[in-house]
Image (cartoon, rainbow, N blue to C red):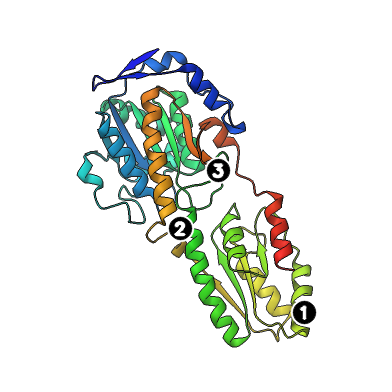
Amino acid sequence: MYYKNDTGGIMKLFLKGIFNDCFKHEDSNLLYNQLSAMKKKIKRIAVLTSGGDSPGMNAAIRAVVRTGIYYGLEVYGIMRGYQGLLEEDLFKMESRSVANIIQRGGTILKSARCKEFYTPEGRKKGYEVLKKNEIDGLVVIGGDGSFKGALNLSKEYDIPCIGLAGTIDKDIAGTDFTIGFDTAVNTAIDAIDKIRDTADAHDRLFIIEVMGRDAGYIALHSGIATGAENILIPERKTDAEAIITSLQEKERRKKLVNIIVVAEGDEYGGIELYRLIKERLPNLDTRLCTLGHIQRGGSPTGLDRLIASRMGYHAVECLLEGRYNVFVGILNNRMNYVPLEQVAKRKGRIAEEWMKVVETLSA
């Protein structure tokens, strides 16, 4: 089967190769596109960023725009995610539109949350804007909530969508990396290292709350990397009594410098854990530090720039090859294409091995 694009080039579409590639991983065991849709000509695409911002989104935007232009496509940027789509706030992007942005945090397209897009009426309005502007395909950079919006849009209307995981939480199944996670972890590590210095100087216990409302990956990775004595995450029940007992034992041994890294979504969280320890161990010099949105900002690391560029490039390739309505991930250093329907239903899980590592190293 051959597919001829607008530049006149001919791309061979080896169906056997596509099926083999999709069945290599557990999360890619379905080829989520209809054969009849493969003949759809892609001439004009749009890209948006939605949900929480993450470092590396700009690198992904840059890759989508420049890859699209390379293949002779018109590329449009949609401002403020789905909200901007409903308001028809979009503009044509050229190669110079994405010059000098790969090193910048945040997103030049801005981001917003749009409750209206959760409704069928809102999605219909969005589709009409895409149809009016002759948009043939949509690249959505965001988290699982953004993917659910793209999935519903593609189900209800003939708009191929491709998802790129732009989230610092790394809570999406089917990929080893999400755009922004590495930067967020390194930001947390840098802050925790500095806090340990002052904790050591004053013999203090520091409770450090990091981001992760539903996922504990940032807490887990930054905690292990900084030698935290305790790591608390939403995926595992917190044994507060065990923590108190451990701190009492360390107090008797005059080990007064302790770091507890806790994800904001843990059942106690930073504030409640601080109150409990102050109540039960009033003589222990305890401090609470919430890192907050500092983890979302900053220049993306080299890894985040690389994976964002790689994912953005393959997002456009997917649209050209007829591989629609998938999320582009990287699994075992290979591209992994997961149907949006699977991503919307499944969360990334923390392996028990990691918890064993935490338990062993903090003993």
- Comes first in the chain, label 2 or label 3: 3
Q: Earlier in the sequence, mark 1 or mark 3?
A: 3
Identify which residue, 125 or 102, lies in the foreground. Answer: 102
Q: Which mark is residue 183?
A: 2
Q: Estimate the x, y position of residue 107 in percent, counting from the top left.
A: 34, 51
Distance from Cα at disc 1 to Cα at disc 2: 35 Å
Report the front residue among 158 and 218: 218
Determine the secondary structure under disc 3.
loop
- The amino acid at mark 2 is Thr
Element marked by disc 1: helix
Spatial distance from mark 1 to mark 3, Cα to Cα? 38 Å
2 or 3: mark nearer the eye = 2
Other residues around mark 2 within 10 Å, as few (<14) / some (14–19) / many (≥20): many
Residue located beneath label 3 in the image: 172
Q: Quadrant of residue 331?
A: top right
The residue located at (55%, 36%) in the rendering is 344
Q: Is residue 259 left or right of residue 143?
A: right
As helix, strand or loop, the secondary structure at mark 2 comes to: helix
Residue contact between numbered discs 2 and 3, judged by CB atoms under 8 Å: no
Residue 315 versus residue 256 in the image, above or below: above
Amino acid type of disc 1? Gln
Does residue 87 appear in this view?
A: no
Q: Residue at x 40, y 12 (%)?
A: 1
Residue 248, label in figure? 1
